[in-house]
Amino acid sequence: MIRKIKFIFIGLLIVGATIRAQNDIVRAIIDEASENSQLEELAYEMMDLIGPRLVGTPQMQKAHDWAVEKYKNWGITARNEQWGEWKGWERGITHVDMISPRVKTLEAMQLAWSPPSNGIVEGEVIMIPDVENQAAFTEWLATIKGKFVMIDMAQPTGRPDDNWQEFATDASFDKMREKRAEAMRAWRMRVQNTGYNSRTLPGALEDAGAAGIFISNWSRGFGVNKVFGAQTKTIPTIDIGLEDYGTLSRMVEHGDTPKVRVEATSVDHGMVPTFNTIAEIKGTEKPDEYIVLSAHYDSWDGGTGATDNGTGSILMMEVMRILKKHYPNPKRTIIAGLWGSEEQGLNGSASFVEDHPEIIEGLQASFNQDNGTGRVVNLSGQGFLHAYEFLQRWMEPVPNSIKGQINTNFPGTPGGGGSDYASFVTAGAPGFSLSSLNWDYFTYTWHTNRDTYDKVVFDDVQSNVILTAIMTYMASEDPEKFPRDRSVLPMNRRTGQQMEWPSPRKPTRKGGGE
Ligand SMILES: [Zn+2]
């Protein structure tokens, strides 16, 4: 009897000591994240100094080298691991001045991978015509040599709909929307009548000798456009801000013949190798089991990729810094992957999953953060039967002010795309998405020319640092390994079929060029 009590007593002592140790580490994580945050410095160096991180650009390479250097300064092993190759391209300047009928410097940016202009080029601005058929369009093509061609519809309003909703009378809001819907129908017909579509039209204009192509890809917010990749091979494709595009368009329609002076520079670097930055803190008891911190590092380059996905990247770097300092001998191995080329199809992370079956085999959990600067508000179990038990346990010591905001969905359903967690989930391994509060992400920052440092909400990112660091610590210490049993998936309401586990992501290892 006495022996038994003694054992229970010792047992309680051990449990007590473990909880004390846990409390100490959790406290140290929170203090470090709050009192000694490096987020602003990391954001400045990554977003302002290095800039956007389009796959295949020298800036992307610089960002990889910078991250490895940062990790080394924190005493963390890190390397750049090649996963493929991509068209190498370097953005230069884009300068567009309207020089007639009045002078104004326009808000303009060449698209990613756009060819340069042929030096400084002056030319008339025209618009694809409203023709009956392809024959008429071909006739018109003979007249466009040396001219800049607008191929998008000018928006009838630069005010976002919620602004109309707040201030317009119901009647004028309805009228605007009808007018816009009609204009969009007419524009679709106009493009269709050329015999080309939006993908093939730029090539036809290029072949006919146009000096450049003007588009305007409005993102439905004040002053914000999305900037993606160019279709042209020899002439620049340039996005013009909604306001200036509207001015040019109205001048063309009124027959006032706007002229511009354009200088767009860029350098084609041929095919270049592409990388993931992998940082690692080796596990002491179970080095062959892993927690993978996951964030895509690449971005589009209209802005500086601040919220897509600079914030996810500095989050994971900051978590690694804090863990190395206050939890330097983790039970399991902790890896942080800063992936390349998520924007072209999760290529960096899907390649990592293919290249490292041993890590996928030993994966305890992967935590991905991507959708903006906001604090985490959603967490899905991704269809894993035991997600509730494990994720709740890992979140247990997270302060209520942080975890209290998170809506959980357990077991949830497996995600097949959207961001890099899907590369793990589709391989049957536990990948979770730390999904953020919106902060007008899709309108204002996602893939736009306004995705810049000033949009970062550092308090929210800091809150995500605390959450991610504590969950990583708890997942590392857990006596049990996360079981991969899948829950019974729900019926797809549209097809009436039972949902299936999505098949593994296939990375594109080579792209962008020809
Ligand atoms: Zn993203």
Image (spheres, grey):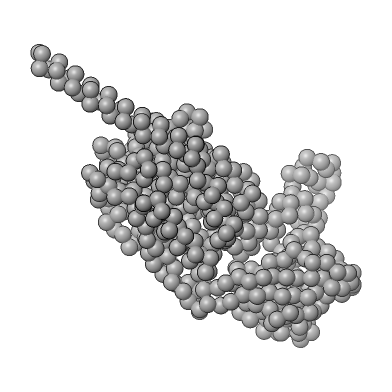
Which residue in the rendered view is the most extreme toward the front? 73
Residue 289 at x, y = what percent?
27, 48
Camera-nearest residue between 86 and 79: 79
Q: Is residue 20 left or right of residue 73?
A: left
Q: Residue at x 41, y 69 (%)?
A: 84
Q: Is 67 located above or below residue 25 in the figure? A: below
Occupied quadrant, residue 133: bottom right
Q: Is 272 located above or below residue 291 in the figure? A: below
Occupied quadrant, residue 216: bottom right
Camera-nearest residue between 298 and 33: 33
Residue 306 at x, y = what percent?
58, 53
Residue 142 at x, y = what percent?
76, 86
Image quadrant occupied by the N terminus:
top left
Camera-nearest residue between 283 and 385: 283
Q: Residue at x 68, y 66 (%)?
A: 109
Q: Is residue 306 left or right of residue 110?
A: left
Camera-nearest residue between 413 and 478: 478
Q: Residue at x 52, y 46 (%)?
A: 39
Q: Is 261 located above or below residue 217 in the figure? A: below
